[in-house]
Image (cartoon, rainbow, N blue to C red):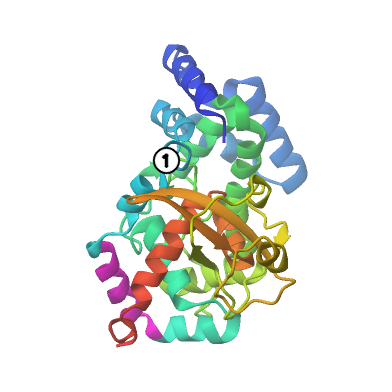
Amino acid sequence: MPSRIMGVALGLWAALAPPLAVAGYVETPAGQAFVDEMVRQHGFDRSKLEIWLSGAQRQSSIIEAISHPAEHTLEWREYRRIFIKPARIEKGHAFLQAHADTFARAEQELGVSRYIVAAIIGVETQYGEYAGNYRVLDALTTLAFDYPPRSTFFRKQLGEFFLMAREQELDPTVLKGSYAGAMGFGQFIPSSYREFAIDFDHDGRADIVNNPVDAIGSVANYFARHGWQAGGPVAEQVTATDYPPSLFTEGLAPKLTVADYKAAGLVPKAAASPETRARLMRVQAEEGQEDWLTYPNFYVITRYNHSQLYAMAVLALSQALAQHPDKARG
């Protein structure tokens, strides 16, 4: 994501930019180059692509939204309030109960906790209730051709979207999703849809947009493919103290080991070997700063969304859902 300053500047640029011609993106050099590439590399019908791009509409609100993601502007205490609410927890219990057999199979076959999978779907779409109101075509074309900081990435996603729609026999002009072009219960971007979505109910189609069974299996598959360790620790709060700055490493990936933290006087409670990679992080909670020691499974959550606040929200919601397993299992 761009920095906050860059985002503000880009938002002003977007507001002042002249409107596109009626013909839309297909008339631009970038649009024509995209069509040429899709025809040459993937055998698409040129006229269909041109019709789809002609119908795509630039959405200024998408530029504004992606320029100011909540993960970059909020503290943990504020971010937590958005996602950890009684209503979301109750809906999560109902979702877990309604699909108990599917969650059990995902745990058995893919080794991923039902509570983590349910928390992802709960954070992303409130269990499928709010999967996004933007046409995916509009979102991806806006970002592919009118968002210079990440135009290369989103142009690739636009191509992946058309490939996905062809593979799944879906109409690319009607699918809806987030402002970033993510779709379905678990909000997969097109490349993730193509790589990680699975046909979990074996009906011949991996449908994560309308089918909760496929969505549950696909989220679990995403985690399994990214190295989720069944039964492994995720994160634990540790006593906040004046730890040396060297213990707070840069980036989301854990670089030190449990042994390193023990040598510095931090005593983890989780059952983890001394060689286990870990990362200490500090967040601003309701009662002041909190220190958390995170493990490889926490890092896996950040592969879904590259934000430690997002991973904290998923962890907190999963813990809330697990507090009353009788409500979740029926």
Quadrant in which the C terminus is drawn: bottom left
Q: Is residue 211 visible?
A: no
81 in the magenta segment: no
Dot 1, crowdedness within 10 Å: few (<14), some or many (≥20)? some
The span picked out in magenta is 88-100
Q: Residue at x 52, y 59 (%)?
A: 292
Magenta stretch prevailing secondary structure? helix
Question: Furthest-left residue in view?
Answer: 87
In this view, the residue in front, 15 or 7, is 7
Examine the rendered structure and indicate whether residue 265 appears above or below residue 161: below
In this view, the residue in front, 190 or 119, is 119
In this view, the residue in front, 272 or 1, is 272
Q: Is residue 240 visible?
A: yes
In this view, the residue in front, 252 or 186, is 252
Q: Position of residue 115 (x, y in %)?
A: 43, 74
Q: What count of labels does the image hold?
A: 1
Circle 1: element type: helix
Q: Position of residue 71 (x, y in %)?
A: 46, 43
Q: Position of residue 169 (x, y in %)?
A: 53, 59
Residue for badge 1: 70
Q: Residue at x 66, y 67 (%)?
A: 262
Task: Indicate the amino acid at tag 1.
Answer: Ala
Examine the rendered structure and indicate whether residue 8 appears above or below residue 156: above
